[in-house]
Amino acid sequence: MAFNRKQVKETGTSILLLPSLVAAKATKIICTRQMQRGFGLNPTTETAKYLSRINAYQSLADHQIVSDKNPEEIAQRVCDLLSSIRAT
């Protein structure tokens, strides 16, 4: 894990897409989505898995974007963010 963290930090700009910045809301959205995939996953396990990982993902991210819009709007947010980074 330490190697992966180092690689992420040294390799460029990282953007974390989240369904919400509110942890409880994001957890519910993510876990509901996981349950709908039909792999026989356990909701309690998936909730614990998400909660155990999210802080690490957030700490690695240079930027966070809430993905609560349609895909085109989210893609535009990412493009705008990357354009603003290149301009500096």
Image (spheres, rainbow, N blue to C red):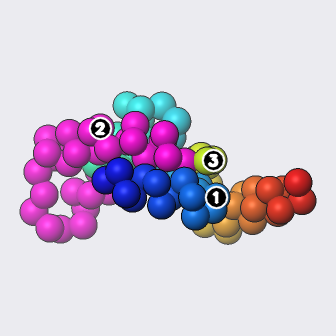
Q: Amino acid at mark 3?
A: His
Question: What residue is rendered at 48% in x and 61% in y?
Answer: 7
| Residue at numbered disc 2 | 51
Q: Is residue 52 visible?
A: yes
| Number of the front mark, 2 or 3 | 3
Label 3 residue SS: strand
**Relative vertical location of residue 26 with respect to residue 16 in this rendering, above or below:** above
Q: Quadrant of the C terminus?
A: bottom right
Question: What residue is rendered at 54% in x and 48% in y?
Answer: 61
| Residue at numbered disc 3 | 63
Q: Residues within 10 Å of mark 3 (few under 14, many from 20)?
A: some
Residue range highlighted in magenta: 32-61
Residue 35 sits inside the magenta stretch? yes
Q: Amino acid at mark 2?
A: Leu
Residue 41 sits inside the magenta stretch? yes
Front one among 44 and 8: 8
| Number of the front mark, 1 or 2 | 1
Calculate the distance from the C-alpha at mark 2 to the C-alpha at mark 3: 19 Å
Label 2 residue SS: helix
Please give left or right for residue 6 compared with residue 42 in the image.
right
Give the dominant element type of the magenta stretch: helix, strand or loop.
Answer: helix
Which tag, 1 or 2, sits closer to the chain's start? 1
Q: Which mark is residue 13?
A: 1
Calculate the distance from the C-alpha at mark 1 to the C-alpha at mark 2: 24 Å
Which tag, 1 or 3, sits closer to the chain's start? 1
Q: Which mark is residue 48?
A: none
Q: Can you give x and y, in whole percent of width and height, for residue 47 in the image?
A: 23, 41
**Relative vertical location of residue 55 with respect to residue 60 in this rendering, above or below:** above
